[in-house]
Image (tube, coloured by chain):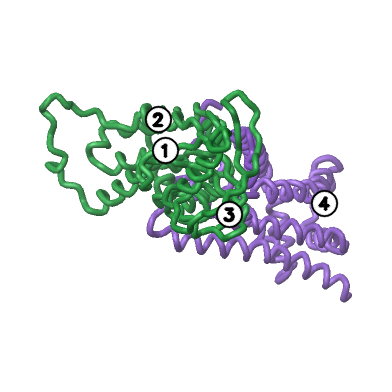
Amino acid sequence: MKLTLKIWRQKNAQAKGSMQTYAIDGVDGDMSFLEMLDVLNEQLIDKGEEPVVFDHDCREGICGSCSLQINGEPHGPDRLVTTCQLHMRKFNDGDTIVIEPFRAKAFPVIKDLMVDRSSFDRIQQAGGFISVNTSGNTIDANAIPINKHDADESFEAATCIGCGACVAACKNASAMLFTSAKVSQFALLPQGRVEATQRVLNMVEQMDKEGFGNCTNTGACEVECPKGISLENIARMNREYLTASLKG
Amino acid sequence: MGLLSSSIARKVAMALSGLFLVFFLAQHFVINFTSVIAPDTFNSWSHFMGTNGLVQFVLQPILIFGVVFHFVMGFVLEIKNRNARAVKYASYKGSANASWASRNMIISGLVILAFLGLHFYDFWIPEIVHKYIESHPEDPTRYYAETVHKFESHTRVIIYVIAFILLAVHLWHGFASAFQSVGFNNKYSRGLKGFTKAFAIVIPAGFIFIALYHHINHLIH
């Protein structure tokens, strides 16, 4: 199929970017969106032009590297997929596709479609872990019985790959879904309860420091999340935060 | 304001002030509805609300604070949220993942705020002038006629109807959203959501009915 691509090009973090139009032919419906961009880049390199920079790594939907705002939606029009899992058969011959980087003050553009998502790393570092002695005396995690419901909910929260689609989709560029998933995966387990109070306070403080917006419960994040992380996690984080604040 | 320095604290404050205003709206509706079914009851309840010390000097200031707090915080959040995305998308498909009501609370909120200006001009300011500035003697029978008189104007009734439609839109997202904000999202949420959506339709529709009832009543007589 033939497509017209409108792609955000920006030389570096300081440069002023703009949308550029490219025509591409011979796109197969079985290609992934990233493979289509690979084809475009090969064409650009052949012509002596600079290829389009975009993030990618595993290309099987688990690393959270690929991003892209495609036709106004993070990871494109399909649901529960990352950009690398989005097939070109979702588009029609002759379509115009607008491709932009994830937009948020806390996700500054590095180049073209690649953004700096290290703000997520700093939120994780503020409390998204448990302090365990790993010097050889570690207690087997399975030695503590955990009811199935809690284990499942915790695991579901832990499937968050930190891609940033929640921020990109949110009209307020809020990182509540990401942060709440990281808070929830520990809050539901006895191993995580030990540091629960400090964890939620520190992670929310870091989230606010990074310049993300405030959540207004539109639910856009849940719809666009490639892993289907639920809004229930945000409610849980709100409860955790309120309880932690009262404890001081 | 240190207490409101975190995003979650602001969200909870927005939710609690909103829930308080929803509660006020429900009682306001009940009293207003008596003007349709029992004018005498309307007069006596209005007289009570207008002269009771607890209502006038404790509840009324709390209500005014609640309203001011809710819209000031709403503006603050709107500005902060706009700043969180300095460079806008060339293409942003908000309708693909969220309702119009949830994405445009600032628009419905501003319409309600403008309406409150008119509502204060219509009822609250004349009431304060009547009672506390001109110091007229108490008359428990004046309220019904004064209220009905306001709904004689076509323009005013049209503005009221539009404002109540936007109030319904605001409540459609806001009422259910408040429970999520305070952390209430569990097996009972589905039923609660149904109640909040019904409330968002029924109460504004009821206010519209009252305005139209008095207006049509005036046209007939």
Seen at 27% across and 36% down, the residue is A193
Regarding mark 1 in the picture, which secondary structure is present there? helix
Residue at (70, 48) in percent of width and height: B107
Tell me where residue A104 appears, x and y as whole percent. Answer: 56, 35
Q: Colour of chain B?
A: purple
Image chain in green: A
Q: Mark yes or no: residue B11 visible.
A: no
Q: Position of residue B23 (x, y in %)?
A: 58, 53
**Amino acid under disc 2:** Asp
Which image quarter is the N terminus of chain B in? top right
Question: Foreground: B189 or B37?
Answer: B189
Asked whether, in this view, residue A23 is left or right of residue A26, the answer is right
Q: Label 1: how many residues lie within 10 Å, few (<14), some (14-19) or many (20+)?
A: many
Circle 1 chain: A
Do discs 2 and 4 share a chain? no
CB under 8 Å between callouts 1 and 2? no
**Toward the viewer: B9 or A162?**
A162
Q: Secondary structure at mark 2?
A: helix
The residue under label 3 is B173
Mark number for residue A121? 2
**Of tags 1 and 4, which is closer to the observer?**
1
The mark found on residue A179 in the picture is 1
